[in-house]
Amino acid sequence: MMQAFFQRWWRDQSELVQDTVKKLVSSGQLELINGGMCMHDEAATHYIDMIDQTTLGHRFIKQEFGQTPRIGWQIDPFGHSAVQAYLLGAEVGFDSLFFGRIDYQDRAKRKDEKSLEFVWQGSKTFGSSAQARLYSLSLL
C-alpha cells in the first residue's frame, strides 16, 4: 500500500476507526504490505531515493502499528534492478515480493518450466541475505 494515500485517509478517520484498524493489523486480519511512501520506478531511480521513500512509509507504520511490512508489492515497475532485490531483502527484510509486470517471453518460459516462484539474487557478495523470493502477479 502506498503510504501517501493511506496516511491521507488515516488522518481523516475517527479514533474509533483508527482503533479498529489497529486491532485488525494486530490480529493479522489486515496486513500492510510494501509500505513505501510511493511506488518507485525500480529501473531508473537512484538507490537513495528507494531507501528514503521506503523508510518514510515504514516509519509511519512502525509508529502507528508497532510493526513493519514483511511483503513487498511492485504492481507496475518498469524493469527490475539487482539493487532492488538487495534493498528489499537484506535491508528492508521482506520475506517475499510480488510484482505485476514481466516480459511475455520470460513469463512463457517460466510457466513452461514451472518456475513462476523464484529467488532473486541481489548480490553474490552478501549471499542469501541479499535475496528476495519473487512471485509475479501476472503468473499466479
Image (cartoon, rainbow, N blue to C red):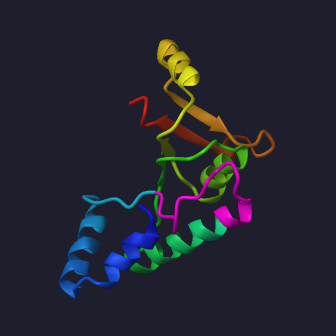
51 relative to 133, above or below: below
Residue at the (33%, 78%) spot, across then down:
10
Specify the quadrant that holds the N terminus: bottom left
Q: Position of residue 118 (x, y in %)?
A: 55, 30
Q: Position of residue 117 (x, y in %)?
A: 50, 29
Residue sitting nearer the eye, 64 or 109: 109
75 relative to 27, above or below: above
Of all residues, the one furthest to the right in this rendering is: 125
Residue at the (52%, 65%) spot, across then down:
38
Residue at the (51%, 38%) spot, across then down:
101
Residue sitting nearer the eye, 45 or 33: 45
Left of 2 or right of it: where is 84? right
Residue at the (53%, 20%) spot, across then down:
110
Specify the quadrant that holds the C terminus: top left
Q: Position of residue 100 (x, y in %)?
A: 47, 40
Give the magenta range. 34-50
Residue sitting nearer the eye, 17 or 125: 17
Q: Position of residue 37 (x, y in %)?
A: 51, 69
63 relative to 107, above or below: below
